[in-house]
């Protein structure tokens, strides 16, 4: 049973021989606020107070529920943008997925050589370069989907790279990566990381991608299926570096580094055979060092 008080002051305590634990008192101002915000009496009972005032309802409405009760969390504007993109992708794009293993021993040697001449270079920079180099051979992997039956293929490999430093997910674009040297690709990615920390991307940095590379290089992430961004036909995923034991022909055991490179593709425009051929071509470039 719930009773109503005329103002927001709790009524005087009454002595009873056997109080009913289900009885609560809800003041009239509290009830008015409940009606305004659609707060149910069941929610009010979860507070666990015998007398509920307007301030208690304000806490419920603000999502500041007392200890022991459920808490309502509102996501950030950046996360809401991600949610819209994810929903559109899953709703409109019939995606398939394939992953290959890339042996990175020669790639590590190249990294050391490149770092000595152009400064910081990591695996993502070399993967962007290798993806872009295959644009002419696999144009539909760089296409823009128009509808179920048509896609537009425009010049250039414009590789969007996911960057998330805890302030939201961004997809800045390394434009014309198929015609630019590794030095410039590395400079772009370094600039993007700094912009992500500040949250200050230029509008041009985020526009015009025609393929995406999603980065999942946190330790122990061995596999990740990327989201195909709306209007793209392909997205690749880069997982973290792993190490394995390798049995040689002479019976000796050595170690080898590797990572997984995945490809999600729009099955309306890219078939499995083409997807595997694209991945193998990128893999061959990377393993060549």
Image (tube, rainbow, N blue to C red):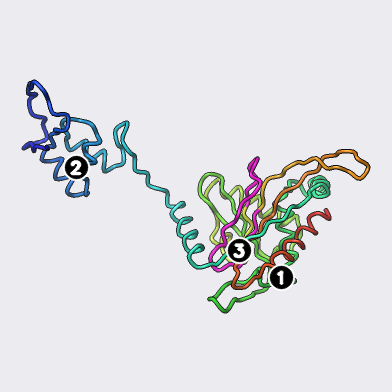
Start-end of magenta stretch? 215-237
Q: Secondary structure at mark 2?
A: helix
Question: Is 253 colored magenta in this rendering?
Answer: no
| Residue at the disc numbered 3 | 96
Residue 102 on image: x %, y %:
76, 52
| Residue 227: mark in rendering | none
69 to the left or right of 216? left
- State which quarter of the image contains the N terminus: top left
Is label 1 in a helix, a strand or a loop? loop
Q: Residue at x 32, y 32 (%)?
A: 68
Dominant secondary-structure state across the stretch colored magenta: loop
Q: Badge 1 local density, few (<14 within 10 Å), some, or many (20+)?
A: some
Q: Residue at x 7, y 23 (%)?
A: 14
- Between 133 and 48, the residue placed more toward the observer is 48
Find residue 41 and name its label.
2
SS label for mark 3: strand
The reply to whether dot 2 and dot 3 touch (C-beta < 8 Å) is: no
């Amino acid at each position: 049973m719930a009773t109503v008080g005329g103002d927001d002051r709790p009524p005087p305590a009454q002595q009873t021989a056997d109080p009913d634990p289900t009885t609560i008192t809800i003041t009239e101002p509290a009830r008015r606020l409940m009606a305004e915000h659609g707060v149910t009496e069941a929610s009010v009972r979860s507070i666990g107070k015998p007398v509920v005032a307007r301030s208690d309802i304000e806490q419920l409405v603000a999502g500041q529920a007392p200890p022991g009760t459920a808490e309502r969390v509102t996501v950030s504007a950046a996360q809401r943008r991600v949610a819209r993109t994810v929903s559109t992708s899953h709703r409109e794009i019939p995606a398939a997925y394939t992953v290959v293993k890339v042996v990175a021993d020669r790639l590590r040697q190249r990294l050391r050589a490149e770092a000595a001449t152009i400064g910081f270079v990591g695996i993502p920079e070399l993967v962007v370069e290798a993806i872009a180099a295959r644009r002419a051979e696999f144009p539909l992997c760089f296409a823009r989907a128009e509808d179920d039956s048509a896609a537009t293929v425009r010049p250039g490999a414009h590789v969007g790279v996911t960057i998330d430093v805890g302030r939201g997910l961004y997809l800045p674009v390394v434009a014309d990566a198929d015609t630019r040297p590794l030095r410039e690709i590395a400079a772009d990615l370094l600039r993007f990381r700094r912009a992500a920390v500040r949250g200050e991307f230029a509008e041009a940095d985020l526009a015009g991608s025609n393929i995406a590379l999603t980065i999942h290089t946190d330790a122990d992430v061995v596999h990740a299926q990327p989201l195909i961004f709306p209007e793209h036909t392909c997205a690749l995923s880069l997982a973290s570096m792993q190490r394995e034991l390798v049995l040689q022909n002479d019976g000796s055991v050595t170690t080898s580094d590797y990572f997984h490179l995945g490809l999600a593709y729009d099955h309306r425009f890219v078939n499995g055979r083409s997807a595997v051929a694209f991945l193998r071509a990128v893999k061959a470039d990377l393993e060549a060092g």
